[in-house]
Image: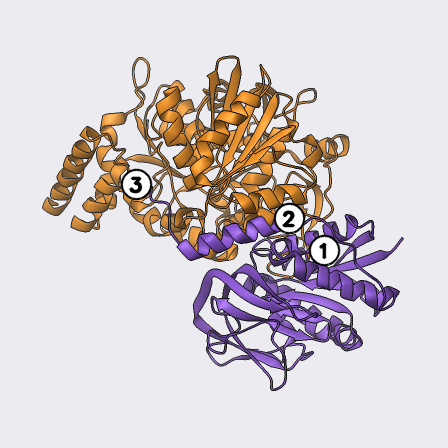
């Protein structure tokens, strides 16, 4: 039986806006296929060695909580995570977790916080927060386009370095910076996004891509992921799209 | 002074007019009064005996318990029972509350205002209100897109407190709330689970675990940035915590709850004990509003009632005992838990506004052997928070197999809730958007086995929408009554 180890980074600190749903989606969709899943919590002070995990998830946290773990991520675990990303381990990162893989975060008073520098992008904080439902277009590895939905809530504006690919294109919402129409980053098997709203449960094509990348890496390129039910994800997505389009508040 | 009089007159006029039109008018009169005289709260609150109740969860239930208990103990009580807990609602209550006094039976010992107060509003109005007692129930994540970070909410409450000389009745098991006692030791009175009893209870009643731990708040020491250790936990981040680095720990409570041994707190009339460590007295208490989280609410209420009566009464004898007895007489069917009968079945509505509330309500339904159906409703209007991702913070997985056989979902974001339920391994019997809300309720009621209960867990605006339909059909009260 195949086995996947999902590393849930800082679950007791980076756990905003339902981000744990992403780990749940990976675990459930793997289990439904008969794959053995182990979820390993990796927090401040916990060991991390290369090869420990097949998929890593890093979510976002409140400022006070990110202050607690950022040293551990950047200084202690940083070199191992960087090497894992370069080596093709699958990572899915959201908001704060996404920002911390970049080069730096510049606060709006000009103070620069060094980040991991695993991928070439940087983030600048601004006072206006982007808080809204989002719609994206995601190009799968076979070239087809999938419409994905989420919810963004961030004050950081991320700018990708030259030649660095975004994860998706913005259809509705702000994405990385509200200017260039890009959303998130994709580098090797690492993905970053600003989308909370528990992105992976509602967008199973992405969840399955992450599982497939991890399984191929572990069991060889001819590994084929079986097709399973979407558990109502497409209905949720269509309902969200309809809700976003009409945008009407129920008047009470 | 004249400004205040005009403001109050205007508020009373607006209230009377709106009431004639069949409206609740729980906020607009105060809003208008505050426009005319920004000092109206201070003027109206001056010289009054006021208790405020704030915190993210359990405010309404605790406020109701306190009101009911004080009334039983011979006080006239005015409260903002409708849950209008912003400055406008509180101003309305202060100005117009006289027409809706809970009158004491027999001779009144005096008038006490019991005011549920929104956390952010508390920061602004605590000083003009100058309450005698401030209760802080707990601090869980709550619509972060609207309120911001939890530590910020804690700081807001701290700021409000510092504008008053109130006695603080605060939760020793919540690290964020307990930290409000630091530097305010002389006026802090803690309530919490009895430490020894909690360790024993946890050993005997291990909590079921899902595949991922629920999203935790405030489990790190803010000073040392080190993870708290817990000798025992109740739920969420509540429990007997200590920091292994600096040694700061959950304070010893004056009022401590001791779990009963034989019955489940989810059942009616759960028997437990409360110890007043200052007086060294243990009293039996009956939990009239079921649910393990309501032990905290009852404990907060008993603590608050003991403390306020210690302040206002000349005879200081037996006040804790009297508060406990009054708590055992609290009327069950009110607050955030509302029940009514339909022929041989029951309907129970539990408002759920944030992850901690949904977690506790699901646990309550899972623990209850009379649960016939579960009906989850999810809207995403401004008052609910636009972001519905919080449902993924809740650990459905550990409760999945104990939830009733029939599950239904509705509301604007019914499909998100359906997805959440299916991810915990359960199926729903029927689902549909807000246009089918009543239709699905009827179906749930129909399919609920005789003698069992339909548990409805709506968020705020879906509760208002469904309730409006049920008011017509079943004659339940309008929300402000």
Q: At numbered mark 3, what does the secondary structure look like: helix, strand or loop?
A: helix
Q: Residue at x 60, y 55 (%)?
A: A198
**Residue B476 visible within the image:** no
Task: From the viewer's side, name the closer residue of B222 and B314.
Answer: B222
Colour applied to chain B: orange
Please identify the quadrant where the C terminus of chain A is shown. top left
Q: Nearer the viewer, residue B85 or B465?
A: B465
Give the distance between the C-alpha atoms of the residues marked 1 and 3, in whole angstroms: 45 Å
Q: Which chain is purple?
A: A
Specify the label residue A26 is tagged with. 1
Q: In the rendered view, would you say A28 is above or below A62? A: above
Mark 1 crowdedness (10 Å alpha carbons): few <14, some 14-19, many ≥20: many
A62 relative to A79, above or below: above
Image: A188 above or below B301: below
Residue nearest the viewer, comparing A17 with A210: A210
Mark 2 or mark 3, which is nearer the start of the sequence?
3
Residue B52 on image: x %, y %: 39, 39
On whether disc 1 and disc 3 are found on a single subunit, the reply is no
Pointer 1 chain = A
Name the mark nearer the viewer: 3 or 2.
3
Label 3 Cα crowd, 10 Å radius (few <14 / some 14-19 / many 20+): many
B140 relative to A175, above or below: above
In the figure, residue B275 lies in which quadrant? top right
Q: Residue at position x 37%, y 38% from top?
A: B132
Q: Which secondary structure, mark 2? A: loop
- Residue that label 3 marks: B89
Report the side of B244 relative to B440 (left or right): right
Question: What is the quadrant of residue B173 in the picture?
Answer: top right
Picture quarter containing residue B165? Answer: top left
Residue tagged by mark 2?
B249
């Amino acid at each position: 039986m195949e086995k996947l180890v999902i590393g849930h980074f800082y679950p007791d600190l980076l756990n905003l806006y339902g981000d744990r749903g992403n780990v749940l989606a990976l675990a459930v969709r793997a289990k439904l296929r008969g794959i053995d899943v182990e979820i390993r919590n990796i927090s401040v002070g916990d060991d991390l060695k290369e090869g420990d995990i097949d998929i890593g998830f890093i979510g976002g946290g409140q400022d006070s909580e990110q202050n607690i773990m950022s040293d551990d991520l950047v200084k202690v675990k940083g070199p191992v995570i960087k090497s894992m990303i370069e080596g093709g381990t699958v990572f899915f990162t959201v908001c704060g977790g996404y920002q911390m893989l970049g080069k730096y975060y510049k606060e709006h008073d000009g103070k620069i916080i060094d980040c991991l520098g695993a991928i070439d992008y940087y983030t600048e904080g601004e006072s206006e927060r982007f808080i809204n439902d989002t719609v994206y277009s995601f190009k799968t590895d076979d070239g087809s386009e999938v419409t994905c939905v989420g919810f963004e809530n961030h004050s950081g504006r991320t700018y990708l370095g030259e030649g660095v690919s975004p994860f998706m294109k913005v259809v509705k919402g702000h994405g990385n910076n509200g200017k260039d129409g890009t959303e998130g980053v994709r580098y090797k098997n690492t993905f970053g996004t600003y989308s909370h709203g528990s992105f992976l449960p509602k967008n199973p094509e992405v969840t399955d891509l992450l599982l497939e990348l991890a399984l191929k890496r572990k069991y060889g390129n001819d590994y084929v992921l079986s097709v399973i039910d979407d558990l109502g994800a497409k209905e949720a997505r269509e309902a969200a799209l309809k809700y976003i389009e009409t945008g009407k508040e129920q008047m009470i | 002074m004249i400004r205040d009089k005009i403001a109050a007159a205007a508020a009373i006029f607006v209230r009377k007019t709106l009431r004639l039109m069949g409206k609740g008018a729980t906020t607009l009169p105060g809003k208008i009064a505050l426009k005319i005289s920004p000092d109206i709260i201070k003027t109206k609150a001056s010289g009054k005996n006021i208790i405020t109740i704030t915190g993210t969860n359990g405010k309404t239930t605790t406020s109701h318990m306190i009101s009911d208990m004080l009334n039983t103990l011979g006080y006239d009580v005015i409260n903002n029972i409708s849950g209008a807990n912003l400055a406008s609602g509180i101003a309305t209550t202060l100005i117009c509350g006289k027409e809706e006094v809970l009158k004491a039976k027999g001779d009144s010992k005096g008038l006490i205002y019991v005011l549920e107060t929104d956390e952010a509003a508390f920061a602004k109005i605590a000083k003009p209100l100058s309450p005698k007692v401030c209760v802080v129930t707990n601090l869980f994540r709550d619509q972060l897109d609207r309120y911001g970070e939890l530590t910020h909410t804690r700081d807001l409450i701290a700021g409000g407190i510092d504008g008053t000389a109130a006695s603080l009745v605060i939760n020793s098991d919540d690290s964020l709330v307990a930290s409000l006692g630091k530097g305010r030791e002389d006026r802090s009175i803690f309530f919490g689970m009895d430490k020894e009893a909690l360790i024993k209870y946890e050993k005997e009643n291990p909590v079921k675990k899902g595949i991922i731990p629920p999203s935790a708040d405030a489990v790190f020491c803010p000073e040392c940035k080190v993870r708290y250790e817990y000798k025992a936990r109740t739920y969420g981040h509540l429990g007997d915590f200590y920091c292994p680095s600096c040694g700061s720990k959950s304070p010893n409570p004056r009022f401590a709850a001791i779990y009963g041994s034989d019955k489940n707190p989810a059942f009616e009339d759960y028997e437990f004990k409360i110890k007043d460590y200052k007086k060294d007295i243990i009293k039996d208490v009956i939990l009239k509003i079921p649910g393990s989280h309501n032990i905290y609410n009852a404990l907060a209420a008993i603590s608050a009632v003991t403390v306020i009566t210690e302040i206002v009464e000349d005879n200081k004898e037996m006040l804790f005992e009297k508060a406990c007895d009054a708590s055992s007489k609290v009327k069950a069917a009110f607050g955030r838990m509302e029940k009514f009968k339909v022929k041989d079945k029951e309907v129970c509505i539990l408002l759920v506004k944030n992850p901690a509330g949904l977690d506790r309500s699901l646990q309550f339904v899972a623990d209850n052997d009379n649960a016939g159906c579960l009906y989850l409703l999810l809207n995403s209007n401004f008052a609910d928070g636009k972001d519905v991702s919080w449902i993924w913070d809740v650990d459905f997985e550990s409760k999945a197999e104990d939830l009733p056989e029939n599950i239904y979902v509705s509301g604007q974001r019914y499909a998100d809730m359906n997805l959440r339920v299916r991810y915990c391994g359960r199926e729903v019997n029927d689902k549909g958007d807000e246009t089918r809300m009543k239709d699905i309720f009827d179906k749930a009621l129909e399919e609920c086995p005789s003698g069992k209960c339909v548990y409805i867990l709506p968020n705020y605006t879906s509760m208002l929408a469904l309730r409006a339909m049920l008011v017509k059909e079943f004659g339940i009260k309008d929300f402000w009554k």
